[in-house]
Amino acid sequence: MTPTDLRAFLPTPRKSWADVSDADWNDWTWQLRNRPTNLRQIEARLNLTPSERLGITEAAVRKLAVAMPPSFFNLIDGDDPECPIRRQVVPRQEEMDYAPHEMADPCGEDKDMVAPGLVHRYPDRVLFLITDRCAAYCRYCTRSRLVSGVGEQELEVDFEEALAYLREHTEVRDVLLSGGDPLLFSDKKLEALLRQIRAIPHIEIVRLGSRVPVFLPQRITHELCQMLRQFHPLWINIHVNHPKELTAEVRDALGRLADAGIPMGNQSVLLKGVNDNAETLKILFQKLIRARVRPYYLYQCDLIQGTNHLRVPVSRGIELMRQIRGFTTGFSVPQYVVDGPGGGGKIPLNPDYVIAKDGERLLLRNYEGEIYEYIDKAEAAEKAPQTKPVPAFRHEELPVG
């Protein structure tokens, strides 16, 4: 696709589902029931490589299942193994190659699980894993050990125990529902859970982490949006990695959520061959803003087992951020982060904009590489000057690179 095409919100093609009625196609339960989930169904629609065939018959059986709603499946280029959509959701043989530094639980969630399904790591917020199922399965999934039903572990959730913990721990003010995908719950089941959480006086914010608006925009019905708006302040974080995923249907689904007063942020993962260039990322972030979604995080790919073929060097990620910041609207630039392996939490990664510091004098590099001096009187008053001097200079003498 050309950059012009990537910027456009294009309708999803029907392709091999051309004979399906509009009523079925727009029914999210039909989309779930008709997901290609095995070699025969996928090979009938894609020209698979040997690596993909082995991935579908091995990795998808032993590590993480494969499934894609037809509306998302049809975004895949059936003849291009390097299609950025295809690389995200079609298994490859490389997924069975585990590097020594890769982990089953790279974020250390299991050790912070205070009740079955409830993770309490940060002081004032918790992660509530309420389901192990998704509309589709990302091949770099941080929780591949838990989700889809074929991983190493089975997700155990005890709703009563988790809710009791929340009631007892008054320091918790923010609850993030994730999984799996919480928007695969029925309206009635999700409403019942949200009502119980909202009844806890010290819970101030509820968030949903969901890929459903992208994988399954048909799920974002008027009825769902009306139900969710009862529980404000409620936020939703979605997950888009490539501009092609933002179709006309996805834009409209996000619009329904925004019209219900739900603020939305996006969490992308930096992936090799998917979004590891500045132009793709800039188009993605600008397109998200047009869809009323704030780019929130750009994640360095976690050290999940079998994802080395998708991982981008951190140095490259920092360089991409340098190429983006300042060259587009500030609030369309996410924070680049790495989740500290083993449970260290999110650690920001940024280009080095502070070149030198001496007491009240700071040398700063801007987005174009130009150098500026800032006099920080407050810093000088609080701290003694550092021993490393900053030489006198003229602006035109400073390096730009």
Image: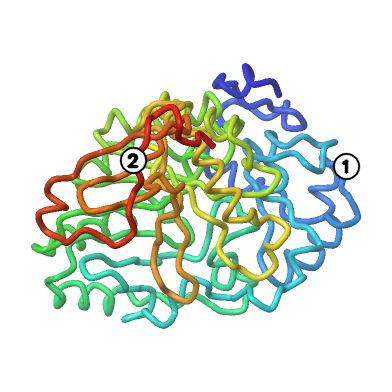
Indicate the quadrant where residue 159 lies.
Answer: bottom left
Residue 393 visible somewhere in the drawing: yes
Q: Is residue 74 depicted above or below 276 in this figure?
A: above
Real-space CA distance between mark 2 and mark 1, rounded to the nearest whole angstrom? 63 Å
Residue 24's disc is: none
Q: Which residue is mark 1?
A: 47
Q: Which residue is mark 2?
A: 392
The residue drawn where x is 53% and y is 72% is 106
Mark 1: which amino acid? Answer: Asn
**Where residue 208 sits in the image (x, y, percent)?**
35, 52
Residue 24 visible somewhere in the drawing: no
Pointer 2 local density, CA inside 10 Å: few below 14, some 14–19, many at least 20: few
Q: Is residue 28 left or right of residue 129?
A: right
Pointer 1 local density, CA inside 10 Å: few below 14, some 14–19, many at least 20: some
Mark 2: which amino acid? Answer: Ala
The residue drawn where x is 75% and y is 28% is 15
**Where residue 110 sits in the image (x, y, percent)?**
44, 79
Please name whichever residue, 16 or 90, is drawn nearer the observer in this view of the structure: 90
Where, quadrant-wise, is the C terminus in this rendering? top right
